[in-house]
Amino acid sequence: MLPFAVALTPGLSPYRQVAYAATRAIVAGELPAGSTFPSVRELSQALKINPNTAQKVISELVRDGLLEVHPGIGTKVTARRRATARERKALLSHEVEQLIVEAKRLGLERDEVINAVGARWSELFGDEKRISTQDERR
Amino acid sequence: MSVIDVNGLTYRYGTTVALQGVDLRIEAGELHALVGPNGSGKTTLLQILAGLRRARTGRASVLGRDVSSLGVADRQRLTYVAEGQRLPGWMRLEQLEAYLAPLYPTWDHALARDLRSRFDLDPRRTLQAMSRGQQMKAALLCALAPRPRLVLMDEPFTGMDAAVKDDLVRGLLDSAGTEGWTVLLCSHDIGELEMFTDHVSVLVDGRIALSTSMDAMRERFKRVEVLLAGSERRLEERDADWISVERGGPLLTLLVSHHDGFPLEVGLRGRFPDAVRIDVRDATLREVFIALTRRGRSAASRSVEMAR
């Protein structure tokens, strides 16, 4: 059993899908700092993915600072570090802009997007700052 | 040195051409899928690589040795599981193992035991008393226990239920995948292959239409949906890199082979300035396979037309 959930769908690189699911589980605290991350073999077996793919996933998470390899012990989730100023700026400008453009194109209102972001945030990370959604008000 | 190296291989059954000028290179450690429609030559190619058929035209080598001169020592390092592999039904599994083990100096009894428990096989059962799925697991066990450097498998998943298929894939990944053995397998089960193989070759009409790593395939082949503004608009010319084009009302679905650095979205925007929307995503192996197969067929029918 893997300590995080992934449902692989064809058409997307399995490597991307697994790396995303693991990142999501780590940032959401499902995999707390210090917990053991599955080995290449365990990932490959549980998800029926190629060991090379599993290896790539682990390398990427190590590179991103989410995991660290302790030779002879295994791979552990690192204590959460704060993002660099550059990483935050990139997320807050580029990716937020993409979301806004797409939302505008689909004719969504500003509040709908902000509420949806808030609701999703609460769902993933618990109630840090609750913003009620349109659905809940009805 | 490539584990499999095939150059200009041609094979005929009487006047029927099964393989025409196949080139294929497979490197050590690849889990390589060979896919193709029925009758495209997959089994013939595997049989030639296993040294069971001899081609008169072209060259094929495995493990650095020409297939026409494979000796005992070479055959001990390569195993082959045929489609619907027949096993001697009167034997118990432990008897089959005891019979095969001395033939392979590298036979690993511990691995055989592991696979037996992983596959939930009873060594005291006779093979004829086993279900088709259990027999296939027994055949895979016998192909992996010699710790071969190359495993050739023809349609190992045919007729397997999902649970047995899972066992087979996991067994294959665990022993061959993590040990870095080279595996070439052909299968119709494209969805299954897409997740666990790292390389794929597509055989269409006896020719290799594509041979690539899965990562490079996802980089190169894109599925594009274009929602055109007016459904009356005609599609004049198709681009050379569109492998398949489907039109349903205002929706145009393309499979594009994209290899230059120029962003595909930008190119498509220029091509369809009035499009309501353009969606691009990586193509699945199934989509690439179908598009290449159809293109192969239409190319064949075009050449027939020209011949008339």
Image (tube, rainbow, N blue to C red):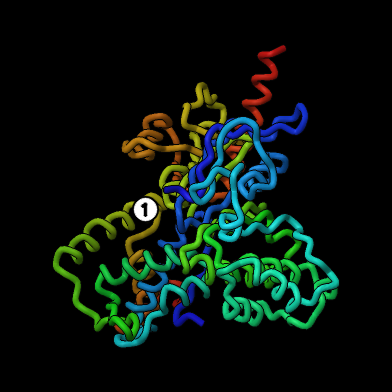
Residue B260 appears anywhere in the view: yes
Where residue B223 appears, x then y in whole percent? 50, 44
Q: Is residue B116 left or right of residue B241?
A: right
- Say above or below: B103 vs A99: below
Find numbered disc 1 in the image and state the secondary structure of the residue it sits on. helix
Viewer-closest of A26 and B201: B201
Pick the quarter of the image with the C terminus of chain B: top right
Residue B122 falls in which quadrant of the image?
Answer: bottom right
Count of labels in the image: 1
- Say above or below: B118 vs B165: below
Question: Which residue bears the numbered disc 1?
Answer: A102
Viewer-closest of A26 and B6: B6
Residue A66 falls in which quadrant of the image?
Answer: bottom left
- Tell me which chain the residue with mark 1 is part of: A
- Say above or below: B308 vs B49: above
Q: Residue at x 63, y 68 (%)?
A: B168
Q: Residue at x 44, y 36 (%)?
A: B275
Viewer-closest of B47 and B129: B47
Residue situated furthest top in the rendering: B308
Residue A126 appears anywhere in the view: no
Where residue B26 appears, x then y in whole percent? 49, 48
Where residue A83 appears, x then y in whole percent? 19, 72
Q: Residue at x 58, y 39 (%)?
A: B291
Viewer-closest of B83 and B87: B87
Q: Label 1 sits on what residue type?
A: Glu
Mark 1 residue crowding within 10 angstroms, few (<14) / some (14–19) / many (20+): few
Q: Is residue B174 left or right of residue B46?
A: left
Q: Residue at x 42, y 68 (%)?
A: A54
Where residue B81 appears, x then y in whole percent? 68, 58
